[in-house]
Image (spheres, rainbow, N blue to C red):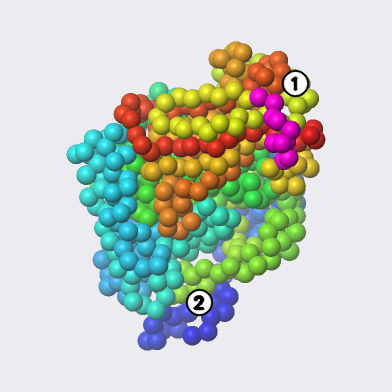
Amino acid sequence: MKHVRYQVVPAMKQRPALTLVSFSPFLYKEIVMKTFHSTLQGWAKSAVPVSLLLLSSMVAAETPRISVLEFSKDASKVAALEKGIASMRANSSAKPDSAAYRTSFAYWSNTHGYFGAGGNATDLDAYIKRRMPECLPQLGEKTCKEYYAHMENTTVPDDGFTNNVWGTCQHGNLNFLPWHRMYLNFYEKTLRKQTGDANFSLPYWNYYEERSKDGKGLAIPALVRKSASDPLFDAWRTPGLNDNSTSITVQTASARQAFAFNDFTNFSNNLQNQPHGAMHCAVGTGCATPDMGFVPIAGLDPVFYMHHANIDRLWQCWLDRKAGGQKQDLAWAKKNLGMPDSWYNIRYTFADESGNQVDVTIADVFDENKFPRRYAADLRCEEPVLKQESHLVATAGESPLKSHALLTHQDKIVLRGKPAAVNLQPAANNLRASVLSQALQETAATYLILENVTIDGAPAITYDIYIANKEQGDKRIYVATFNLFGAGDSDHHHDHSEGMQLIFNVTEDVSKLGLTGPDSVSVTFEPTTLSSRPVPQANSSSGISVGSIRLENTAVRP
């Protein structure tokens, strides 16, 4: 059957034709005006261009997504969400080749990834064999087996198109953000239909809104941890998250590095690592346990979709900043994102809210008629400034590093559960050629570059990365955290066994460290569980290796 872009195609010949339903002019006007007034209320609190405010108000034909905390204050919204998820869970028992099954919770989880056979599947036995050894030091054999027991293989339905839908999640490449926007769009439409509320919108998880009992860490939304009988509950989260006795470390949720870049490639790469991957692992015991910690079944946890709605919101905020009020259509994207035309023609297949096949391209993501704006304008992105222990950090000033083109550490660093610190030194002449893209070289900044980074095995302990003043060991600034989500997975572009290059913008950081010269810079790696849970002291053959480190200053040419 011939498909046209964004065409809805009945999955079975006997399926009745799709009925198109349009908004009444009065309902559309009501939605637009509510969005408009809601946006204006926040105008005075942020420096948002008038053109952006008007654009975000007038193109949104759907109720904007709001944070889980705000969403939870409306009992009718909560009831609708719980009804919709319960209905989708019930549909998981429908005949696998039926339209009802294609609107089920299981189907949508499997769209992201699944265990079983097929080109996009993950081998369950091999996965358990690789992951279990790193779970044991974290939780012990009894608990690990309990966590793993519900994982099972699934057979792809023989319905003519699901083999092109399941397991198509995109990670480790620049399709990550548009694919997940498509995924959320059709998931939300399916959930909306199951709620029976035409105005329903999926809430996003603003990580900083709900705190742990002691106020020092972050909590998963109270909405998804009310009771084991609630359809939003998932029993397989990091132990202690559901009763709020365990917290997620504040820096884990940081998107600071992503927003430090104005080019799409480095923004996307950093956002995918953190907070996206880091928060997956924070909820999934360092990515040693399901559901959120394992790519093939992360979609079994309802908080997964709230998490990805927030990642999508952060992307939208970055687009808004970059566009500066311009219309973000396909022409704008091609001019500003630096991606080849062929990228926009990449096509993916999903099931719509009626269980019918729908094909979309990345170009469609920039068509507001197909993917309307889903968030109110907020150029601040609700990204708090991380507290860096002010007594440990000198006041901002001129950095002596501006007189040096490059500092390096050329010896391999092997991280296996213990802290590590390395000193940087002025680079030899043969190492001074920049490894940065031309675009980054043209902007005066200081970059910390970790080269040939490999994830060895399937570690459950990751590391916070700090840049420090080695002459005053207590002065250091947090930079980022290594992402372990999907580590060691050869399926769906998750394999990290080959060396990666990680680039971090540390321009402001080096100016705050009170450095006395290029010989005073060190980089430290601190093991973390991403939560208040202690780091196990057991030895492990799994870990992270860093081939070399560079501190490159693009303001100075070698």
Looking at the rendering, which quadrant does residue 132 occupy?
Answer: top left
Q: Is residue 434 above or below residue 491?
A: above
Q: Which mark is residue 8?
A: 2
Q: Position of residue 397 (x, y in %)?
A: 74, 20
Q: Secondary structure at mark 1?
A: helix
432 is within the stretch colored magenta: yes
| Residue 338 visible in the snapshot | yes
Horizontal side of 145 relative to 223 (left or right) equals left
Residue at image mark 1: 400
Q: Residue at x 64, y 46 (%)?
A: 266
Give the Cα separation between the discs numbered 2 and 1: 60 Å
The quadrant the C terminus occupies is top right
Q: Is residue 547 above or below residue 1?
A: above
Q: Residue at x 69, y 55 (%)?
A: 337
Horizontal side of 226 relative to 120 (left or right) equals left
Horizontal side of 210 relative to 239 (left or right) equals right
